[in-house]
Amino acid sequence: MDWNKYEAVIGLEVHSQMLTETKTFCGCSTKFGNPPNSNVCPVCLGMPGVLPVLNRRLVEFAIKMGLATNCRITPYSIFARKNYFYPDLPKGYQISQFEEPICVDGYVEIEKKDGTQKKIGLVRIHMEEDAGKSIHDQGKETLVDLNRCGVPLLEIVSKPDIRSGEEAYLYLQQIRQIVTYLGICDGNMEEGSLRCDANVSIRLRGETRLGTKTEIKNMNSFRNVERALDVEIDRQYLLIESGDRVKQETLLYDADTNEVRPMRSKEEANDYRYFPDPDLVPVVIDDAWIEKVRASQPELPMERRNRYMREFSLPKYDSEILTAEKEVADYYEEIVSGLKLKTEAAYKQASNYVMTDVLRVVNEKSVKIGEFTIRPSQLSRMIDLINEGTISTKLAKEVFDEMLRSGESPDSIVEKKGLRQLSDESEIGKVVEEVLQANPDEVGKYIGGKEKLFGFFVGEIMKKTRGKANPKMLNDLLRQKLDRLKN
Amino acid sequence: MDVTIKDVEHIAKLAKLNFSDEEKEKFTAQFNEILSFMQKLDELDTSKVEPLSHVIELENVMREDVVKPSLPTGDALKNAPSKTDKFFKVPKVIER
């Protein structure tokens, strides 16, 4: 079978929950985890006679997202009612945007494993409100909590530019990085702050029309999106190759079995009867507002990564890991700015400590880097101590562990534990002498040509100095002495 | 275009309402009456008129993102025909 005849055509709809203090159209708190039905009021409960009033910060967040994804910000945008009945939607309609969404026609750039870049187009980004939460697994009836009802969302709709599960994964990663860098969403897919539905079809390569698409839901992690899409692409391919047809339907992804299965088979095509919401007046955004938001935009992940490669001469790999999360990048930069000895080597050392030691512990303890015991200034000082020759990298490891335990400053740890590196030539020389005298047999063999024993002497000397001898000095002195004995 | 009985059935279904056959006939006729009354508007030349989404000439009515007190849970649940002490209770709805 020739899989290469076909290509997949994927479009993603991402719902991103906004980090506003209050809901979209009322002053109820958006705080997660409050007791059920305690963040509700007549507006979000859909009581008759109430009037929704738009949250200004949501508009600002939407403009931020639009600018970060190269969208055009619509000068005049309106809200619409999307009508359907479900118990978690007490009004019987969701306030959303249909015609005239706030942002249109942007793109997000992804970079594939082989280094090639690709633009994934965005059709639109619009503002809408979330629905409540239904709990189905308690007793005979469904319980409804409306705390989430009315919490603001941005829906980000991509063009059908995505061609594989991998591209979908990378696109989502970019979206997640952008929203978290902008500080408008916490980006947590497992907790539902980012939700993703996919439209998938396949077609013969070169064909410009779209094939019949299916919609996949219930993918609660980036990896699951990638897997679900790959499974669905294969399924459609096998259907078509066996002379069958793809049926337009909604599928649910089951992560346990790695399968997709139909969600509702009998339901007729959705008919949401969108119409402009008469309760809400148009949102008019002038250039001054856009420019004000633009001026407050932070550096975006891709820009920051490129700057790390340029400014700190870091490898791309390091730069990507360090900038994947804004907090990690901030942490790294705080170390760098605290360094007294600002050299490329020190930047790389800082990167190594963050990527390996810091992130290892942070992940093990699953804490946020902002709450990590060791503060960036402590690491700056530790790296300076290494580069001043006060401690060796080996002893730095001990300093690191002690900082983790006690939170003390590197200097006081070095003093207290006597970790100061031995950098006195005559003292090291004395130890070298002692070790050589104590091991006449080995010295003999070394002179006889068994040069591997050099390491043995180094080990002995380190033992005697409790690891504190300046390694370079030790090496030089030992080599000199042994060479002299040889001749 | 005329409204047919099928359209009425579709709209009733979306509204989760059940009607008798006589009612459906009656509504079909009424829908058509309303539409033909509205068709009077077609006599106007609107080719140079911008589409209007709102009749009130207001824009950018917004509020600051500041938390206001919510309703006590007990009050929020007061009108619910079925409830627990914290939740609204509805007949089981599962989409899977």
Image (cartoon, coloured by chain):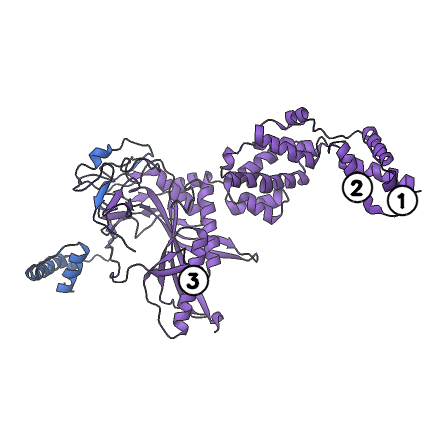
Query: Which of the two residues, A428 or A92, is positioned nearer the viewer here?
Result: A428
Q: State the separation of the CA atoms marked 1 and 2.
A: 14 Å
Task: State the image quarter where residue B61 is shown.
Answer: top left
Task: State the image quarter where residue B71 is shown.
Answer: top left
Instruction: Tell me which chain appears blue.
Output: B
Q: Position of residue A32 (x, y in %)?
A: 35, 38
Q: Are marks 3 and 2 on the same chain?
A: yes
Task: State the image quarter where residue A471 is shown.
Answer: top right
**Where does label 3 land, which residue?**
A231
**Where does label 1 land, which residue?**
A447
Q: State the separation of the CA atoms marked 3 and 1.
A: 67 Å
Amino acid at circle 3: Val
Most extreme residue toward the right is A487
Q: State the separation of the CA atoms marked 3 and 2.
A: 57 Å
In the image, residue A164 above or below residue A375:
below
Disc 3 versus disc 2: nearer the observer: 2
In percent of the image, x 47 and y 54: which residue is there?
A169
User: Which of the two labelled residues, at mark 3 and mark 2, occupies the earlier sequence position?
Assistant: 3
Label 1 marks a residue whose chain is A
**Picture disc at residue B20:** none
In percent of the image, x 29 and y 31: which residue is there?
B68
**Picture disc at residue A456:** 2
Disc 3 versus disc 1: nearer the observer: 1
How crowded pointer 1 is (Cα within 10 Å; few <14, some 14-19, many 20+) is rated as some
Query: Which of the two residues, A55 or A383, is positioned nearer the viewer here?
Result: A383
Label 2 marks a residue whose chain is A
Q: Position of residue B81 (x, y in %)?
A: 16, 42
Query: Which of the two residues, B16 or A181, is positioned nearer the viewer here?
Result: B16
B60 sits to left or right of A427: left
Q: Check the rendered structure and report the hue given to chain A.
A: purple
